[in-house]
Image: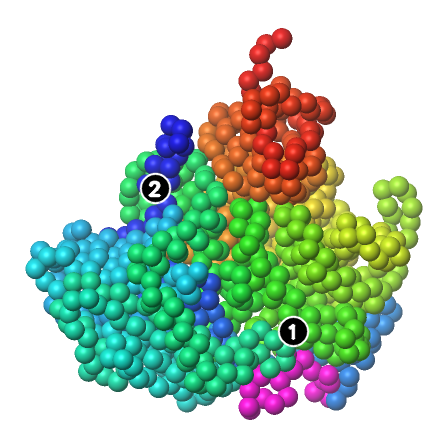
């Protein structure tokens, strides 16, 4: 290891840990709780607990001294969907309106009215285009793992108390000393072994004496409203708590097995049903496995397992893990985690000091942090976004939801924020913005598989609402809207103004397409991604209609615009015939399908037709204030819509799209005017979107100002993002945004330091990914890249853009000069071998 690498690692070690000197229930909340009946307890939970997860399961740790608690989740534990009391459940889709008219007829009528210019009548009819509320459901908290310790009573928090989350190893821990005994607790959630593992130790005079329980979260009113859990607890083998149950709402079965292992000390039955008492132990290992009979398979969404079969499956998981020692489980967990997390290292010149995270955040908020401390928090939150992704989105599972996998609430969507669903209105998209660029591509598998699973139920939506039918086995078009659940909920919600959003699918497909762009994985493109794009284009081929709006292209040719009708720009303004939001996404969709077909060498005739269609979408128009119009009828800024609205979907061509970039000058200036108009402050994900957009526009200092505002106003002490309540998209949008400030690859080249702010004058980043499967490392000093290292996984031509690059030389890993083609002062192109390395540096000898 070089000296430089060592310094980087030391700094990372000091920085890459969240830690506190008090338990979660003793913290003073710094922000209001948010809506959805957020209680003081919910607020405490969302601001202070520390999360671990293996995607399927999640836990959030309090770190109480006498009473320790971990809220526990399983990603599939959802109310809603198919159920005995909902024999006709159909993804919320309704064929008929409440007046008995066919939705598809109303849809057609709305289109005709809009075309006749009868906007008010058309808009009035839009409210009919809704789905049912019945069966939407909500994600449910499972319960809590509790430890009630005897003898750990203290008036004060011990001075050596520490509660921490080590991001480098994905380990959470609590430690303190009481009565000359040192207590440590370590928590991990293992993806390779499918378990949660806990190690408790007491070193000194006293031993561990505690009751352990695993009660489900089942508030009384929830049971009365039949949204609760029917549950039974039993003790097996004198050391294992088995919980078996069913959700009242949809009869989903769930089962958990918690096993206590001690080598010294006794395990006895506890005082209440389903509890165990551990006596006089110096070390205790606890393993937890859990599962449900959910299966993402339309239309039943169940495995079909009996209670006993589910129990056997969960027990088997636990038994397999139980053969291994705790240390072995921990090593396997760390290896799996390091493989993804360890790829990216960020050094912004952060301070090498160790301060509790809440103190660091507070100093930042009060503008009392040193520059080094600010960098430390900026790096920490960056890597936290990567940690949260790895902990909440792994192969074989559902994607991360609005809170990743962590939730402490039960009930309906008025209590569980937005049902904690799969919101495709920027939220699910944002969760997956950093996966490719920040080198975690495998974490996107749950998303791609999930979107694929919306196709079958989504064909019902296409049929009912647009009259587009797929015969058995046919793929004639699928649709889905804002809200989505694990049960193929594809209807347009129960209110048009937030529920209707067919462009949600092209939008999320963009994330799926990016998987191919970054990995060059031909098989995935052929077998999964292109078929989805193709079917979506097929849908829009049938939906798009001539608006009679005149468009004049850059080359002077004139035609009329094809639009989808009705459209609504999230979540304000009028109902219209097309809008920038939807047209931009469609432009990108057609482009992705065309490119995909060309790569795969298929659908030649369609490619030509798709190009003609794309040519008539004309997504972007500039308004009288020089802005990107959100609606085609908009004149000057502010003439329509709400000022400072948190959504800025008319700017999707900036990010995550490609229509507006620092290369397209005319649109770029317009986008800046529109961005300024939306304001710098917003909710969590709103900050994430602003950050990524400023970065894409090459405006590092504005991007950095967003970062400062996010730190100052938008994060809880546990660094979760505050919508409020907690919503994980803002965390992941931040990680994506920082990546976009340092590296971009959307405009046909690998752009080095495209939006470096003044505050980050020197630093290094290692392991970012550029499109075309190229790994990039950048070292910069005084705002200038001094060395760039590229690793081309698949080989091919690379086009690199960087200020001053024409004065640098390119060498291979043996130090041999590589030939390149120079284009102006900022661009070079050269060929790389598969697995080849290139160093671009400022080592040129004077001529
Ligand atoms: C969108 C946003 C809300 C919230 C919800 C989950 O509808 O407008 O702010 O984030 O998603």
- Residue carrying label 1: 490
Q: Main secondary structure of the magenta part?
A: loop
Question: Magenta part of the protein: which range?
Answer: 81-99
Q: Choose between 599 and 648: the one closer to the eye.
A: 599
Label 2 or label 1, whichever comes before in sequence order: 2
Position of 580 with respect to 545 (left or right) is left
Judge whether residue 85 is colored magenta: yes
Residue 717 placement (x, y as % from top left): 35, 54
Q: Is residue 178 visible?
A: yes
The reply, left or right, for residue 169 in relation to residue 774 is: left
Residue 50, x across and y down, in percent: 35, 59
Considering every residue shown, the one lying at the far top of the view is: 847
Under circle 2, the secondary element is helix
Residue at (33, 57) in percent of width and height: 328
Foreground mark, 2 or 1, reads: 2
Q: Quadrant of residue 345?
A: top left
Which residue is at 77% across, 75% downward? 473
On residue 615, the disc is none
Q: Residue at x 87, y 48 (%)?
A: 552
Q: Is residue 698 visible?
A: no
* Residue in the image at 28% along x and 82% along y: 235
Dot 2 surroundings within 10 Å: few (below 14), some, or many (20 or more)? some
Q: Position of residue 575 (x, y in %)?
A: 72, 66
Residue 282 is left or right of residue 303, and the answer is: left
As drawn, 775 above or below 784: below
Is residue 586 within the magenta segment? Answer: no
Q: Which residue is mark 2?
A: 13
Q: Quadrant of the N terminus?
A: top left
């Amino acid at each position: 290891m070089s000296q430089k690498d060592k310094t980087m690692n030391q700094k990372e070690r000091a920085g890459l840990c969240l830690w506190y000197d008090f338990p979660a229930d003793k913290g003073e909340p710094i922000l209001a709780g948010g809506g959805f009946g957020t209680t003081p307890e919910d607020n405490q939970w969302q601001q202070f607990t520390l999360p671990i997860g293996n995607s399927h399961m999640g836990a959030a740790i309090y770190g109480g001294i006498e009473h320790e608690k971990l809220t526990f989740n399983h990603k599939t534990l959802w109310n809603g969907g198919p159920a005995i009391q909902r024999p006709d459940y159909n993804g919320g889709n309704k064929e008929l309106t409440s007046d008995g008219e066919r939705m598809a007829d109303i849809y057609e009528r709305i289109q005709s009215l809009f075309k006749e210019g009868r906007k008010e009548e058309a808009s009035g009819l839009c409210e009919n285009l809704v789905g049912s509320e019945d069966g939407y459901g909500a994600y449910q908290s499972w319960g809590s793992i509790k430890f009630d310790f005897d003898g750990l009573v203290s008036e004060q928090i011990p001075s050596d108390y520490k509660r921490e989350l080590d991001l480098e190893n994905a380990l959470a821990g609590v430690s303190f000393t009481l009565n000359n005994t040192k207590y440590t607790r370590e928590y991990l959630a293992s993806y390779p072994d499918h378990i949660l593992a806990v190690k408790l130790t007491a070193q000194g005079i006293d031993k561990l004496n505690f009751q352990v329980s695993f009660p489900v979260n089942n508030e009384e009113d929830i049971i009365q409203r039949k949204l609760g859990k029917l549950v039974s607890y039993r003790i097996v083998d004198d050391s294992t708590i088995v919980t078996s149950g069913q959700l009242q709402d949809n009869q989903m079965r769930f089962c958990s097995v918690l096993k206590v292992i001690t080598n010294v000390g006794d395990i006895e039955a506890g005082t209440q049903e389903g509890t165990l008492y551990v006596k006089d132990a110096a070390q205790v290992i606890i393993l937890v496995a859990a599962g449900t009979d959910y299966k993402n398979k339309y239309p039943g969404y169940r495995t079909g397992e009996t209670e006993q079969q589910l129990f056997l499956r969960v027990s088997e998981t636990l038994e397999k893990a139980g053969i291994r020692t705790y240390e072995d489980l921990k090593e396997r967990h760390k290896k799996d985690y390091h493989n993804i997390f360890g790829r990216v290292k960020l050094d912004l010149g952060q301070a090498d000091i160790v301060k509790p995270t809440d103190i660091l955040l507070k100093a930042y908020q009060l503008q009392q942090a040193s520059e080094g401390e600010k960098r430390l928090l900026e790096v920490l939150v960056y890597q936290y976004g990567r940690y949260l992704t790895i902990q909440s989105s792994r192969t074989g599972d559902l994607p991360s939801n609005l809170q990743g996998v962590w939730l402490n609430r039960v009930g309906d969507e008025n209590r569980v924020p937005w049902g904690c669903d799969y919101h495709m209105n920027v939220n699910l998209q944002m969760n997956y913005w950093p996966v490719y660029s920040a080198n975690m591509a495998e974490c996107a598998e749950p998303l791609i598989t999930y979107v694929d699973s919306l196709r079958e139920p989504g064909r019902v939506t296409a049929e009912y609402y647009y009259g587009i039918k797929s015969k058995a086995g046919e793929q004639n078009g699928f649709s889905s809207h804002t809200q989505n659940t694990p049960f193929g909920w594809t209807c347009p919600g129960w209110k048009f103004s937030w529920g209707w959003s067919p462009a949600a699918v092209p939008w999320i497909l963009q994330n799926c397409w990016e998987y191919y762009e970054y990995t060059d994985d031909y098989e995935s493109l052929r077998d999964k991604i292109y078929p989805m794009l193709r079917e979506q284009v097929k849908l829009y081929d049938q939906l798009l209609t001539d608006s009679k709006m005149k468009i004049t292209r850059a080359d002077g040719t004139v035609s009329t615009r094809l639009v989808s009708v009705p459209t609504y720009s999230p979540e304000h303004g009028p109902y219209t015939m097309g809008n920038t939001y939807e047209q931009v996404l469609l432009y990108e969709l057609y482009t992705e399908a065309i490119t995909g077909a060309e790569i795969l060498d298929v659908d030649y005739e369609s490619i030509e037709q798709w190009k003609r269609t794309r040519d008539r979408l004309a997504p972007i128009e500039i308004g009288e204030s020089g802005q990107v119009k959100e609606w085609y009828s908009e004149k000057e800024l502010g003439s329509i819509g709400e000022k400072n609205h948190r959504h800025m979907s008319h700017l999707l061509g900036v990010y995550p799209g490609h229509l507006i970039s620092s290369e397209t000058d005319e649109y770029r200036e317009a986008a800046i005017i529109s961005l300024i108009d939306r304001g710098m402050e917003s909710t969590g994900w709103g900050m994430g979107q602003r950050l990524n957009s400023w970065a894409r526009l090459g405006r590092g200092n504005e991007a950095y100002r967003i970062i400062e505002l996010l730190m100052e106003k938008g994060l809880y002490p546990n660094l979760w993002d505050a919508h409020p309540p907690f919503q994980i998209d803002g965390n992941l949008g931040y990680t994506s945004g920082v990546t976009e400030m340092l590296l971009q690859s959307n405009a046909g080249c690998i752009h080095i330091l495209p939006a470096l702010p003044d505050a980050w004058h020197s630093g290094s980043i290692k392991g970012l990914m550029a499109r075309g499967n190229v790994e990039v490392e950048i070292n910069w000093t005084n705002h200038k890249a001094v060395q760039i290292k590229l690793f081309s996984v698949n080989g091919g031509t690379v086009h690199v853009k960087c200020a001053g690059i024409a004065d640098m030389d390119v060498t291979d890993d043996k130090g041999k000069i590589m030939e390149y083609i120079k284009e102006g002062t900022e661009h070079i192109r050269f060929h790389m071998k598969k697995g080849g390395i290139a160093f671009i540096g400022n080592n040129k000898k004077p001529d």
